Image (spheres, rainbow, N blue to C red):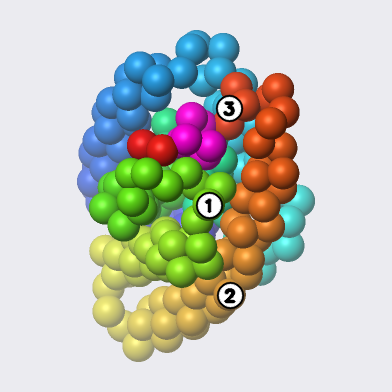
Amino acid sequence: MHIEPGVVDGAKMVFAYGTAAAAAGYSVKLIASDLAQHNILSFAARSVLATVGVFVFFELLPHFAVGVSEVHFILGTTLFLLLGAAPSALGLALGLLVQGAFFAPSDLPMYFVNVTTLLVPLFAISALAQRIIPQDRAYVDLAYADVLKLSVAYQGGVVAWVAFWAFYGQGFGADNLNAVWTFGAAYMLVVLIEPLADLAVLAGAKALRGGGIRGLFTHRLYHAG
């Protein structure tokens, strides 16, 4: 999902600064909501876990340059289900920043573009989860169909934002259209893997239901809404 430097540049970057600022503002709202249900230590621990997870997903898991961008296993739905929307948002933003600052400095000019691409789909699945998941069902009890819907929404949102940035920055020429199409087709293959990863992680969390580490997970993982 990394938009390469030069795809969006010059005055067009102003829009990216605006979208990133809006995403930061909405993240503050999510953080306030999270702290109403969890203590500060739980929030901090989950945010650290999310940041470390994002760094591992970006830097250590396989990733491939395809078309206009790169295909990564972000596992955004997994982060959301385990840790909650607010820690996941903070982890995505910080994990991306750490990767850029220490391992891929050439990506830093596109930070605001890429952080928007990651966060807005996360906000979308947070809202979607409230609509499609019954309030009396904990996340550990979700079925494959539930996590598939969330995964398709997240990955589809990432693809949509990448396509937007590519067209916004480079127009609708034949080469750009082909690059976006190639990226989108490759990226949606992640949907074949992520729901299975989600279910495996949720099964592991369910086995730990009686353990003493619940503070490391979002309240909704084990409880009704």
Find the distance from the CA under tag 1 to the CA under tag 3.
21 Å
Whole-number angstrom distance, CA of label 1 to CA of label 2: 20 Å
Name the N-terminal-most of marks 1 and 2: 1
**Judging from the image, what secondary structure is the residue with disc 1 in?**
helix
**208 on left or right of 31:** right
Image-based side of 157 in relation to 99, left or right: left
Pick out the residue farthest to the top: 40
Residue 19 relative to residue 116: left or right: left
Q: Considering the image in quadrants, where does the C terminus appear? A: top left
The residue where tag 2 is placed is 192
The kind of secondary structure element at disc 3 is: helix
**Residue 174 point in image, percent of width and height:** 35, 88
Magenta segment range?
Answer: 218-223
Q: Specify which label sits upstream in the sequence, 1 or 3.
A: 3
Q: Residue 46: which numbered mark, if any?
A: 3
Q: Of residues 174 and 137, which is closer to you in this image? A: 137
Is residue 219 located in the magenta-colored stretch of the structure? yes
